Amino acid sequence: MLFAGVVTVLEIGFLYWNSLRGVAQVSRLAGLPYPSASPTPPAVQLTIHGVDWPTTLRAYAQLTGQPQQAVLAALSQATLLSGPLRGARQRFLDDVFATCQTPLPHRQLNDLQRRLNTGQDWPS
């Protein structure tokens, strides 16, 4: 149980750091001042794949209904905020959605990315 808590804390830390990178990127694209155009990386190497990723994936696979949709939406948004949906980001979402036996909504993710790049609001 303690290990799951540590994994969760590291995931939250990664998502927070990644979201801050996204905010910096969006601010830069919008031409708004931001204290640091390139945020400093965390003192600890936080990667979602670096802390018992198979166990985390199994936990995601156990989710159903609204909790699963909330996790998939949060991970999708954090991934889109960190940059274009290709390469490692694409493989990450492919992996998570496949584990949850949910088709990856390519069209919706591309639309969200386009909205983000043009400075539009996230849909509710």
Image: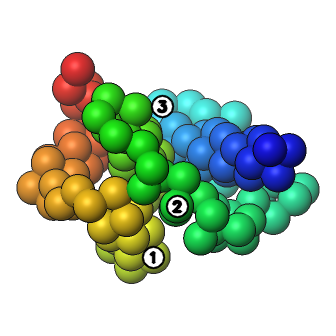
Q: Position of residue 16 (x, y in %)?
A: 64, 39
Which x, y percent locates residue 27? Answer: 47, 37
Does residue 43 appear to the left or right of 57 in the view shown?
right
Q: Earlier in the sequence, mark 2 or mark 1?
A: 2
Q: Residue at x 71, y 68 (%)?
A: 52
The residue where tag 3 is placed is 32
Q: Are marks 3 and 1 in contact (CB under 8 Å)?
A: no
Tell me if I can see residue 26 in this picture: no
Q: Nearer the viewer, mark 3 or mark 1?
A: 1
Amino acid residing under circle 1: Ala
Q: Is residue 42 above or below residue 48?
A: above
Instruction: Residue 88: give its label.
Output: 1
Q: Give percent across and percent down for residue 110.
A: 17, 55
Which residue lies most toward the top here?
124
Tag shown at residue 58? 2
Residue visible at 48% across and 31% down in the picture: 32
Mark 2 vs mark 3, foreground winner is: 2
Viewport quadrant of the N terminus: top right
Tell me the distance, in whole angstroms, between the alpha carbons under discs 2 and 1: 20 Å
Q: Earlier in the sequence, mark 3 or mark 1?
A: 3
Q: Secondary structure at mark 1?
A: helix
Residue shown at 23% from the left, 20% from the top? 124
Within 10 Å of disc 1 (Cα), the crowding (few <14, some 14-19, many 20+) is few
What is the three-letter code of the residue carrying label 2? Arg
* SS state under label 2: helix
Q: In the picture provided, is 51 more to the left or to the right than 113? A: right
Question: What x and y, as percent, mark residue 51?
Answer: 74, 65
Report how far apart the C-alphas of labels 2 and 3 lie in the structure: 40 Å
